[in-house]
Structure formats: C-alpha cells, structure tokens
Amino acid sequence: MKKLQNKHIVLAITGGIAAYKSADLVRRLQDAGASVRVVMTEAATGFVTPLTFQALAGQPVLVDENTSAANGMTHIELARWADLVLVAPATADFIARLIHGRADDLVAALCLATSAPVAVAPAMNQQMWENPATQANIRLLDQRGIHRFGPAQGSQACGETGFGRMLEPLDLVEQCTTLFDTGLLQGVSVLITAGPTQEPIDPVRVITNLSSGKMGYAVAQAALDAGASVTLVSGPTCLTPPQRAKVIPVQTAQQMYDAVHEKLDNTDIFIGVAAVSDYRVAQPADAKIKKDADELSLVLVKNPDILASVAASDPRPFCVGFAAETDHLEGYAREKLEQKRLDMIAANMVGNGQGIGADDNALLLLTPRSKVELTRAAKSQLARQFIEHVAKHYLEQKNPA
Ligand code: CTP
C-alpha cells in the first residue's frame, strides 16, 4: 500500500528559488499515491511557470481568483477538497502573512479557509531565517498547530551556508506521511458498518436508500491511518474499499446484524455509519411480482437495530452512532444517543443535496457530556477529525484519569 494512497494534497508554491524543487515534489507525492492540485502565488510564477506544474499534476494550476472559474474549483472548494495543504516553498514573507491571518492572495486565503492540516516547508536565506522577526513568526506557527517541515542546513542558492534550505522532496513526502499516520488507535480493533442495506421485495426488486457509503469508507480509511485494525461490514456500494480493511459484504440488515455480532468479541470500538433499512418486507415473493393488480401493498416488519443491540451487549465496545436528520438535528441526535445508550453520536443534516451521496459534509459530535461542531469539509478530512475525537473519548474512557 502506498504511503499517501487516496490523500488529497494541495501543494501551494510561494515565490522562492526552491520552487524549482516543487516540480519534483509533485511527482514524488504522486508516486506515494496522493492526488495533487497546485496553487501558486504570482511571485512563484516568476521562478517556475504554471504550465510546468499543470503538465506534472495533470490539473489546471490556480494562481489567483481570476483563474478559478476556468479551473472549475474555487479556493473554497479546494480548501474543502484538501486532506493537507502543503506550502513548499514557504517564504519568510508568506509565513509572516500566514501568521497575521492575511487573505491577500490565493495561497493565504486557502490556508485560512481550510480545516485540513496546513504544513509549511520554509525556504529562505539563512540571515532571513535567523532574523528575530522570522523566529518569532515561527514560534507562533508552532503554537498554532501549523506543521513545519524543516528548514535544513546547508549551502544556499545565494552562496551562503546555514539554516534556510527547503527539505528535499523525498523528505517532505516522508513528513507528510507521518502527519497521516497518527498512531492514535495503534493496536485497537474497530468494527464499522457502512453503506445502505437492501431488503428484497422479490428476486429483482429491493427497498433501499440513497446512502453511497462514502462516509463509512472514509471513516474506515481514517481509522486505518490512525493505526487501527479495521473490519468494514458494508452494504452494496460502488466504492473501492480501503486497502488493509477486512471487508465483509452484506445485503440485508439482518445479514449486517449477523456479521457484526459474529465479530463483536474482538472489537474495541464499534461505529455504525450504515443507513440501515428500518423495515423489511415480511414475505418477499419467490418469483417476480407481475403488474396485474392496480394496487399493491407490502407488509413491512421491523429490522433489528444493530447499533442498539451492540450497545446493549455485555461486555460492549465503545459505541458510536451516526444520525442523519432532515430537521431538529441536535435534539433528535441527543435522543438517539440516550435511547441507544451510546458513547458518542455524529449528527449530520441530510436532504436538499446535503449529506447523502455528497463528497463533503459537516458533523455535530455529541457525547453525554460534550458537543463539538466539525465544519463542512471533504468526507475524508471530516473522517480524520472525527476519528481523532473518537480516539480521545475512547482512550479517556479506557484509562480514566
Ligand atoms: N442503525 C442500526 N440499525 C438499524 C437502524 C439504525 O444500526 N436498524 C444505526 C445507524 O447505523 C446509525 C444510527 O443507528 O448509526 C442511527 O440511524 P438513523 O437511521 O439515523 O436512526 P434510526 O435509529 O433508524 O431512527 P429514525 O429512522 O427513526 O430516525
């Protein structure tokens, strides 16, 4: 498995001579499995042309707001798409602007607009690096949780020697990898349900729902990245499951229930992301139903609630549910948290193009004693933040202070 498989990386290039190394960086990130989109400051285009990066990334390059329409992705969409924004090279001037929350060019605006991690690879003359103003800015970067890769020491393009060289592309790829491998759930086994279920009406017809499985699969990937061993019990989807996940394909809610309970003994954390059909047809027809009658009634009976049954088992894993609601989001989600006796619930609005089937989402995370909002972002990004919260609460419960 490639180290950055399926990761969306926005490579932002600011105006320093090290920009020539960023061309190689694009290739190295792609070799590691990442999808790369490039944005540049105007100053950066003086060192390397956008065409170079367009050819390497196979995608249009964003230079300023005016180019966004042609590219079909605005800086806000890019900010949501990104799993990581990597600014390489990051000049002293750019770092100063980043620290002050400026949004006066596309790269700075992107860094403000994203909820993905931002990492900078500083590159500047050693005197500029040592300057107390730069050092104060770097301390602020570190305090604010902006990741910093380098700089390295060595000879510089200006003929001087010292700190300020941008890290080599392969070192930067390595640093990106460590950001995703959090190790938060090392040695923990996580069981996840995902996708829709299908309840047969007859041999060719089913009752199902619009769930795409994207959120469940993203949660599985994020749990794997955090070091967990993951079993994914999945209803029918068109998605490629994450490598390294043990996948159990199922069709009906009852099959999902059986697969989950079969695995439960070895599970530390259960996360129910699936949109499980609440009802099934009492007596599915053995042969295809003909359209002879003007009206047709189906008798439906209730399916077992998988999540509630897991939460009621003894011993039980740490239990996390999802609540997809069209209204009264927090109220309904809190009711489900309490009624199903969960440790955490992730609530999201659905309908009108939101949630189901979409590539991005927003979540409200509720535990019996806390509430956190995760703002709208790509499902992969959101899943990573979600898993960080799950890991925190799971570890707190397991090792109370
Ligand atoms: N769930 C489940 N088994 C079911 C129904 C739901 O495991 N038979 C899980 C879902 O995977 C999700 C949570 O329960 O984690 C909430 O699902 P949701 O469909 O929002 O709620 P329901 O409990 O079905 O309630 P309602 O449909 O009335 O909103």
Image (cartoon, rainbow, N blue to C red):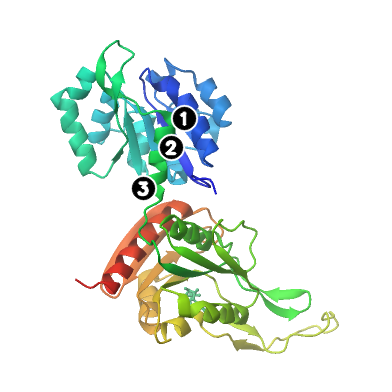
Residue at 51% in and 41% down: 34
Name the amino acid, label 2. Val
Residue at 36% in and 47% down: 115
Alpha carbon of mark 3 to alpha carbon of mark 2: how far?
21 Å
The quadrant in which residue 96 appears is top left
List x then y, in percent, for residue 26.
49, 31
Residue at 16% in and 22% down: 131
Alpha carbon of mark 1 to alpha carbon of mark 3: how far?
23 Å
Q: Are marks 2 and 1 in contact (CB under 8 Å)?
A: yes
Badge 2 local density, few (<14 within 10 Å), some, or many (20+)? many
Alpha carbon of mark 2 to alpha carbon of mark 1: how far?
8 Å
Q: Secondary structure at mark 1?
A: helix
Q: Which residue is mark 2?
A: 173
Q: Which residue is mark 1?
A: 25
Is 78 left, or right, of 337 in this rendering? right
Q: Against 202, is 152 above or below?
A: above
The quadrant in which residue 129 appears is top left
Badge 1 local density, few (<14 within 10 Å), some, or many (20+)? many
Q: Secondary structure at mark 3?
A: loop
Residue at 23% in and 73% down: 400
Numbered mark located on residue 152 in the image: none
Numbered mark located on residue 115 in the image: 3
